[in-house]
């Protein structure tokens, strides 16, 4: 009979079990995951648009933090998952955040979900992640559905460069200021907007951005999915007249057309400016005013200075 090693003695095994951390013991369980904060993407509409890994993490979580427990409970019920839920939203985030961080520090597995799509996109999850990282707590992401990327894919607008601009302000002045700032961005712009304000926002965009192609995507992946394409002016007219649908929409606006720089005007401006200011300052000013490449403006200024010396 083979002699047992001292490490195999029952009393030693019991001692090891007592000293083992809850996190390590859980990690040995079938389907278990280590302690930490898990950012889990959930469907934006169709309940089956959820990854196998997301289901595994949700089923193994000690706690699921969600915007609305009723919304998340329905999704979990569809997939046969029953786990403790806690509300974490704009109204209670400051109060609940320390509690969640303490649970994670104590060895808990906490999953963060939004009502639909990927957490941290226009929800309070950003501060939770930032503070978890500051405390050296583990953070992982379980990627999946996103209304931003789903809308971009369906839009037919340029997808090589895009900017997610979130929700526009309800205040008219602040909304106009934000649109003015985005006017020259050479990328497809993506917004979330309440369907009640679609007509108003599209009208402001048509006025500030001009004649650009745009897309309004609603109810993505759901039974009544609606993707409407047209110019900003056409879409503004439609949603101003039509009864506002329910919910929120993903609004996408094509980039501005690239305008060729009139270097004749640039040279004339340079000649006038160089009479009373340094080349560097003149190039900065003229490039900004004329939306021209600064290096080209500066190089042309060098040529003009050389000619004036001759």
Image: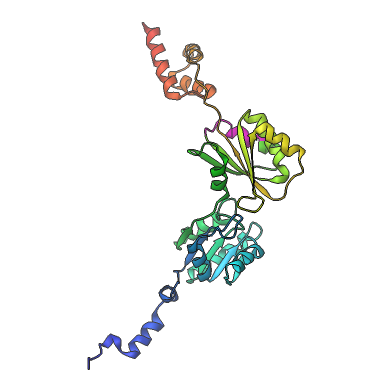
Q: Residue at x 63, y 53 (%)?
A: 222
Q: How far across and down, in percent of the image, does residue 113 sit?
A: 57, 60
Query: Residue 300, relative to residue 56: is it above or below?
Result: above
Q: Nearer the viewer, residue 295 or 230?
A: 230
Q: Looking at the figure, which quarter contains the C terminus?
A: top left
Query: Residue 163, relative to residue 29: is it above or below?
Result: above
Check residue 86 for magenta coloring. Answer: no
- Taking the view exactly as shown, the residue that stands out farthest to the front is 223
The secondary structure that dominates the magenta segment is helix
Query: Residue 227, relative to residue 237: is it above or below?
Result: below
Check residue 182 for magenta coloring. Answer: yes
Q: Residue at x 36, y 83 (%)?
A: 16
Regarding residue 138, the answer to whether it shows in the image is yes
Q: Nearer the viewer, residue 4 or 309?
A: 4
Query: Where is residue 78, by image quadrant?
Result: bottom right
Q: How far across and down, in percent of the image, does residue 105 sit?
A: 48, 68
Q: Residue at x 68, y 31 (%)?
A: 233
């Amino acid at each position: 009979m083979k002699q047992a090693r001292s490490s195999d003695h029952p009393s030693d095994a019991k001692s090891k079990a007592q000293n083992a951390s809850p996190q390590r013991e859980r990690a040995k369980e079938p389907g278990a995951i280590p302690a930490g904060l898990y950012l889990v993407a959930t469907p934006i509409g169709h309940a089956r648009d959820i990854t196998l890994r997301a289901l595994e993490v949700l089923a193994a979580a000690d706690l699921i933090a969600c915007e609305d427990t009723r919304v998340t409970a329905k999704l979990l019920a569809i997939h046969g998952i029953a786990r403790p839920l806690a509300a974490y939203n704009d109204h209670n985030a400051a109060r609940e955040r320390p509690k969640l961080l303490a649970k994670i520090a104590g060895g808990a597995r906490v999953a963060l979900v939004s009502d639909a799509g990927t957490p941290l996109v226009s929800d309070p999850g950003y501060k939770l992640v930032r503070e978890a990282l500051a405390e050296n707590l583990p953070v992982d992401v379980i990627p999946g559905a996103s209304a931003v990327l789903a809308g971009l894919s369906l839009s037919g607008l340029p997808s090589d460069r895009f900017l997610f601009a979130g929700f526009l302000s309800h205040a008219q002045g602040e909304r106009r200021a934000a649109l003015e700032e985005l006017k020259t961005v050479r990328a497809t712009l993506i917004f979330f907007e309440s369907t009640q304000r679609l007509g108003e926002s599209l009208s402001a965009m048509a006025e500030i951005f001009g004649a650009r192609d745009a897309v309004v995507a609603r109810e993505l992946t759901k039974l009544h999915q609606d993707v409407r394409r047209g110019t900003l002016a056409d879409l503004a007219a439609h949603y101003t007249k039509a009864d506002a649908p329910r919910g929120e929409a993903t609004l996408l606006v094509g980039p501005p057309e690239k305008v060729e720089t009139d270097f004749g005007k640039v040279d004339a401006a340079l000649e006038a400016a160089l009479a009373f200011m340094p080349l560097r300052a003149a190039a900065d000013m003229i490039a900004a005013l004329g939306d021209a490449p600064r290096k080209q403006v500066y190089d042309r200024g060098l040529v003009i200075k050389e000619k004036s010396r001759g």
